[in-house]
Image (spheres, rainbow, N blue to C red):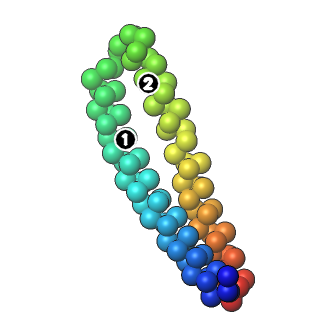
Amino acid sequence: MSVGEVKAALRAAIEAARQGQRVFDKAVSEAEAATGAANAVLRGSHHEHVTNTQQALAAAKAEVEPTRRRFNGTAEHAGDYLTRLG
């Protein structure tokens, strides 16, 4: 693989990471809206399934920022490597 091919692959990886983040952010936005609506309907419920679902949603929400950092880190590291290649 030539240096030019490596650079092209890195540019493609950077774009894929950025696009992945845009798709992820849209999914997060939609999930937050749906979760808010569900919480409004289920507020005050102590049913086991409701409690389990709310816990699962809270766990998923806790993964949002780490996942965003992974997308950003991927693009940043690939960009740094691309810059070092010249």
Residue that badge 1 annotates? 31
Frontmost residue, 4 versus 31? 4
Q: Position of residue 9 (x, y in %)?
A: 58, 76
Q: Earlier in the sequence, mark 1 or mark 2?
A: 1
Quarter holding the N terminus is bottom right
Left or right: 69 as drawn, with respect to 35: right
Q: Amino acid at mark 2?
A: Gln
Residue at 35% of width from left, 34% of height from top?
A: 35
Residue at point 37% right, 53% down?
26
Q: From the viewer's perspective, is residue 84 above or below residue 39?
A: below
Q: Position of residue 78 (x, y in %)?
A: 64, 71
- Tell me the residue at 35%/13% (across/down): 45
Viewer-nearest residue: 32 or 18: 18
Question: Quarter of the image containing the C terminus?
Answer: bottom right
Residue at left offset 54%, top offset 54%: 68
In the picture of the structure, the residue carrying the numbered disc 2 is: 54
